[in-house]
Amino acid sequence: MVRSDAEYRSAIEKMKSNEAFAEEQRRALMQKGLTEEQVERAMQPSLSFHAGLAEEVSWYELVRRREFKPISDLTHIGRLLIGLRIANGMTQKDLAERLGVSEPQVSRDERNEYHGITVERVQKILKALNESMEITIVEARYEPYEPTSPRRNPEPVGVT
């Protein structure tokens, strides 16, 4: 994930060099007499890498402009917090100072996309970023949860 201007510039350079490499690779494979289908199959790892990098760059550009896509799963809250820091033009060091933690701590947290973060910690980060969050509840698009009562003497599985 691109989390800073330096990483953004590096990603842009990687994309450019990857495009040049992919073209050279495509030409070399065609010269070896491979069919178009074989060339495309051989190119998939390079194309996949390029697409992933392009997606990261695009995400970074969007959050710099404060264009956030809604999240529909709270497990994505970490990526949103990272985006908010970027949108506010703050470095990890700036955020660390506001939170009263070390810069390496913020770096580790962001690298893990704040996996397992508590609600209290989310609130503290939002406050440090001078941001707030609004949550909207919508009807589920999946089967509703129906608790089942545990069986007292479950039947052994696979025994007749």
Image (cartoon, rainbow, N blue to C red):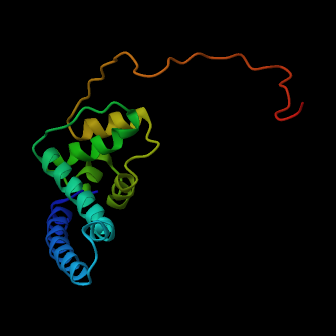
Q: Is 114 left, or right, of 160 in this rendering?
A: left
Q: Is residue 160 above or below residue 23?
A: above
- Residue 14, position as x, y percentages in the image: 19, 71
Kindly identify the residue that appears in the image at 47 percent across and 42 percent down: 116
Q: Position of residue 61 (x, y in %)?
A: 13, 50
Camera-side residue of 76 and 94: 76
Q: Residue sitting at 22 percent across and 40 percent down? A: 129
Residue, x 38% and y 32% (percent of image)? 73
Q: Is residue 98 left or right of residue 60?
A: right
Residue 137 in view, yes or no: yes
Relative height, residue 133 to residue 77 (above, below): above
- Report which quarter residue 37 is drawn in: bottom left
Q: Quadrant of residue 117?
A: top left
Q: Nearer the viewer, residue 103 or 44?
A: 44
Q: Position of residue 5 (x, y in %)?
A: 15, 61
Say if residue 88 shows up in the picture: no
Nearest the viewer among 157 and 104 is 157
Q: From the viewer's perspective, is 39 left or right of 105?
A: left
Instruction: Count every numbered label the image shows and give the total.
Output: 0
